Amino acid sequence: MSNARHNDTGYPMVKIPAGEIELRDDRIKTIWTVNVNSFLLAPVPVTKALYFSIAQQTADPIDEPQAPVTDVSWHDAILFCNLLSRLSGLKECYSVIGSGGDVVCNWEADGYRLPTEAEWQHACKAGTDGYRYGELDEIAWYKENSGGKVHEAGLKLPNAWGLYDMLGNVWEWCWDLYDVKVYDSYRIFRGGSWAEEARGCGATCRRRSHPSFRIDDLGFRLARSVFYK
């Protein structure tokens, strides 16, 4: 992970260049284009070691501490981002509004947040135009090579921008709602996992679930906005 640079909080992040990405929803046969500003993205998903040291502030031993944390809901990820921001002296990105628990994001805040799905896909592709940024067995843990379990983050080859496990190992929550009219509050996750068939581990594959959903192959990765003075 030598391409990762430490930012002002000491947490390693990779600066992702601005660009344009094409998103698609095969369910409703729709394609749209999104301009993505430069932003920061962690080179690996949030690990068990980081998550439990911040969320539970425990020094107890953890099995496979450098494996991505799983069984975290979208709400868990949001709360973690805010907590890590506070502990790092950064402004929190997320606020809960009203009795319904709606979450809003302050995009002008400098704290940690989830990537948007456009940011995630742009970072995953890293300038390539295919479904994957390399040969699947070389870049991802998936059903055929994972042995039925999650693996330590960063063991497979990274993409051209120094990001590991963008495909396979664990799905990653994104900020975005999927389709409010049909799925209400469902949020998007991307990337495939150790339990996923090969066809599900691709840069444009989209999945969704309720923000309270937790499962053993779903985690998240940290992002931050970039501001220019």
Image: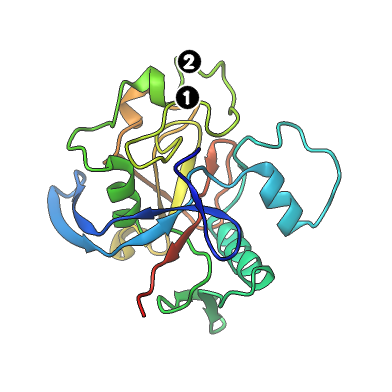
Q: Does residue 107 lie above or below 124 as drawn?
A: below
Q: Does residue 164 lie above or below 92 as drawn?
A: above
Measured as percent of width and height from the top left, residue 103 is found at 49, 73
Q: Is residue 158 left or right of residue 45?
A: left
Image quadrant where one finds the C terminus: bottom left
| Residue lying farthest to the right in this orientation | 60
Query: Residue drawn at (30%, 60%), measured in percent from left and top?
Result: 179
Using the image, tell me which numbered label, if any, was put on residue 145: 2
**Foreground of the two, 181 or 195:** 195
Measured as percent of width and height from the top left, residue 170 is found at 50, 37
The kind of residue on which mark 2 rests is Asn
**Foreground of the two, 164 or 32:** 164
**Mark 1–mark 2 CB contact (< 8 Å):** yes
Label 2 SS: loop
Query: Residue drawn at (49%, 64%), measured in percent from left and top?
Result: 113
Quarter where residue 157 is shown: top left
**Foreground of the two, 42 or 31:** 42
Label 1 SS: loop
The kind of residue on which mark 1 rests is Trp
Q: What colouring does the structure picture have?
A: rainbow
Measured as percent of width and height from the top left, residue 224 is found at 46, 64
Measured as percent of width and height from the top left, residue 131 is found at 23, 32
Q: Is residue 47 left or right of residue 202?
A: right
According to the picture, the residue beneath numbered tag 1 turns out to be 141
Give the CA distance from mark 1 to mark 2.
Answer: 6 Å
| Residue lying farthest to the bottom in this orientation | 98
Query: Residue drawn at (45%, 35%), measured in percent from left and top?
Result: 165
Graded by Cα atoms within 10 Å as few (under 14), some (14 to 19) or many (20 or more), the crowding at tag 2 reads few
Query: Residue drawn at (35%, 22%), measured in percent from left and top?
Result: 136
Quarter where residue 70 is shown: top right
Q: Does residue 73 lie above or below 131 as drawn?
A: below
